[in-house]
């Protein structure tokens, strides 16, 4: 097996304790399998990106001794590839333009008797599906993947075990290109994982429920599905996932080894020997617990 993994941060801020866990886990898994580790800066959601955060993230990783094996890729430079994928899906009848505003969608959901619970998302009701009349003269805003009427995805996470979701009933037709013209994360991540030949995705558990959508999209595009490992999250004081939104402090890298030790303990690694960075990283690779579970 020729293993290719990646760390794919969104530069909406610099690394914090939670993102270091995902970075370290993906690096350790790659090294434990003699694989290649890549970096991809996921800067498609430009209004949320913080200028300079991308280079600061690369610097933070380097301070922690986590060096990519190939030059980093910026998603902002890859629009032509996303367009090509969207064109292919549209030509195959798997993507269609959508004229709905958020209000239109809520009205259609209410008319169908769907009630939204707090913070829950309701599936897109399929208003603009071609078989239901398409745009009907309205201007197209977003592009969506046609999931079909049933789109049950069964998959196995290396840590969480057997998972399943019917994307059609849980999410509905996935947005590929947003109404504001920006590329959606789901499309960009699937196109890039395929283009970079990623065999193993290791990332935070908050993204586990995105995986069925991504597998559906991989199948629609005819690209391979990588193995997935979703890592434990660092929780903030309020019990929610630590994130830039709930005030995660940037990593204090005055002592990189202390930051790495904290990340390793979230990953369930025992206290490890090594007082110099390279020695500690080598003992962490040797102790990596998910080695045997590679598909
Ligand atoms: N860019 C995403 C994030 O920072 C991660 C994408 C992924 O690993 O698939 O949340």
Image (cartoon, helix red, strand yellow):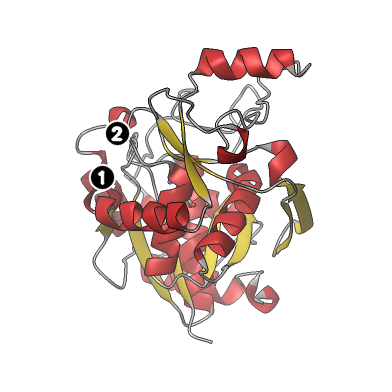
Disc marking residue 54: 1
Ligand 1 within 8 Å of disc 1? The answer is: no
Residue 83's x, y, as percent?
32, 52
The residue lying toward the viewer, choosing from 38 and 247, is 38
The residue lying toward the viewer, choosing from 24 and 281, is 24
- Tell me if residue 134 comes above or below residue 194 in the rendering: above
Residue 117's x, y, as percent?
74, 17
The residue at which mark 2 appears reads as 49
Residue located at (68% from left, 78% from top) = 292
- Could you tell me how many numbered marks the image carries? 2
In this view, the mark in front (2 or 1): 2
Residue located at (27% from left, 71% from top) = 70
User: Can you say which quadrant of the picture contains the C terminus?
Assistant: bottom right
- Tell me if residue 31 comes above or below residue 81 in the rendering: below
The residue lying toward the viewer, choosing from 224 and 158, is 224
Instruction: Report the Cα–Cα distance between label 2 and label 1.
Output: 9 Å
Left or right: 239, with 97 as reference point: right
The answer to whether residue 32 is visible is yes
Residue located at (67% from left, 48% from top) = 148
Crowd rating for badge 1 (residues with CA inside 10 Å; few <14, some 14–19, many 20+): many
Q: Give the quarter of the image for residue 116.
A: top right
Left or right: 222, with 43 as reference point: right
Residue 140's x, y, as percent?
40, 30
The residue lying toward the viewer, choosing from 54 and 42, is 42
Q: Secondary structure under badge 1? A: helix
Disc marking residue 139: none
- Tell me if residue 227 comes above or below residue 95 in the rendering: below
The mark nearer the N terminus, 2 or 1, is: 2
Determine whether label 2 and label 1 are within 8 Å by CB: yes
Residue located at (72% from left, 13% from top) = 111
Residue 31's x, y, as percent?
47, 75
């Amino acid at each position: 097996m020729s293993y290719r993994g990646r760390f794919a941060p969104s530069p909406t801020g610099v690394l914090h304790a939670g993102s270091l866990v995902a970075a370290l886990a993906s690096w350790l898994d790659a090294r434990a399998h003699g694989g290649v580790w890549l970096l991809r800066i996921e800067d498609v959601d430009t209004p949320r990106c913080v200028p300079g955060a991308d280079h600061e993230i690369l610097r933070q990783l380097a301070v922690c001794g986590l060096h990519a094996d190939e030059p980093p890729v910026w998603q902002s430079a890859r629009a032509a590839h996303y367009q090509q994928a969207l064109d292919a899906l549209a030509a195959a009848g798997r993507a269609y333009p959508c004229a709905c505003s958020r209000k239109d969608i809520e009205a259609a959901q209410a008319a169908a008797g769907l009630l939204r619970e707090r913070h829950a998302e309701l599936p897109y009701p399929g208003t603009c599906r071609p078989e239901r009349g398409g745009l009907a003269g309205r201007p197209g805003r977003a592009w969506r993947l046609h999931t079909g009427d049933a789109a049950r995805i069964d998959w196995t996470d290396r840590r969480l075990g057997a998972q399943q979701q019917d994307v059609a009933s849980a999410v509905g037709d996935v947005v590929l290109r947003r109404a504001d013209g920006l590329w959606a994360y789901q499309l960009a991540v699937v196109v890039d994982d395929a283009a970079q030949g990623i065999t193993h995705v290791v990332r935070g558990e908050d993204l586990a429920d995105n995986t069925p959508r991504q597998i559906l999209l991989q199948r629609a595009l005819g690209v391979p599905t990588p193995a997935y490992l979703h890592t434990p999250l660092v929780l903030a004081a309020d019990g929610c996932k630590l994130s830039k939104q709930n005030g995660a402090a940037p990593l204090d890298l005055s002592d990189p080894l202390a930051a790495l030790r904290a990340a390793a303990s979230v990953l369930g690694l025992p206290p490890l020997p090594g007082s110099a960075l390279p020695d500690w990283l080598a003992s962490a690779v040797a102790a990596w617990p998910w080695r045997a579970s590679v598909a």
